[in-house]
Amino acid sequence: MNGPQATPFALRFPDNRTLIIRDHDYPLDDAYCFLNGWYDLPRAELVSNFSYLEEVSDRYCDHLAKTFPGYWNITMADLFHESESDEAFLRDIQKNGADVGYATPSLVDGMYLHAAAKCLMRGLPPLWVVLYYLYYLVK
């Protein structure tokens, strides 16, 4: 059951932030958007200004490239495996009927992997990111 009539459950993250989830069909989307900070973006600007959306996306993909060097090696198989694992974790929290579930660091990392995979769907990272990775991190 989804929507306002759905029984909400809270997901508490390792940094002590809490997300209330009502989407029982695919709660991964809520965790994904919450952890990546996308619920904090100005909605009107996002839906009415495509250039702004691209700028936000570019900045976030650059951030991920610095935070997770080499993320462009992620495969669709990696994303599917991570999705299955994350979905199972969230389903188990819902099944046990608890009001609060505790997200693991692995779930948090998984949400960043989801974001990185979506950055790849936009295209490879800028050349400077690849060169930085090769020069500083692969020595």
Image: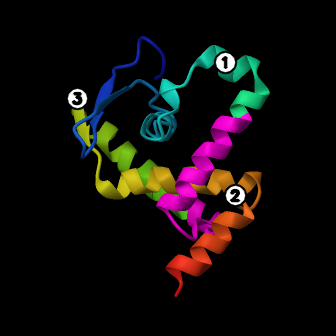
In primary-sequence order, the first of circles 3 and 1 is: 1
* Above or below for 36 versus 61: above
In primary-sequence order, the first of circles 1 and 2 is: 1
Q: Residue at left 47%, top 50%?
A: 111
Element under disc 2 = helix
Q: Position of residue 58 (x, y in %)?
A: 67, 45
Element under disc 1 = helix
Q: Work out whether residue 97 or residue 36 is closer to the camera in this orientation and state it.
A: 36
Residue range in magenta is 54-80
Q: Residue at left 46%, top 27%?
A: 23
Q: Is residue 64 magenta?
A: yes
The CA distance from mark 3 to mark 1 is 34 Å
Q: Which mark is residue 72?
A: none
In primary-sequence order, the first of circles 2 and 3 is: 3
Name the kind of residue labelled 3 in the image.
Asp
Name the kind of residue labelled 2 in the image.
Leu
* Circle 3 residue: 99
* Above or below for 79 versus 118: below
Q: Residue at left 30%, top 28%?
A: 9
* Circle 2 residue: 120
* Circle 1 residue: 45
Left or right relative to 3: residue 122? right
Q: Is residue 106 magenta?
A: no
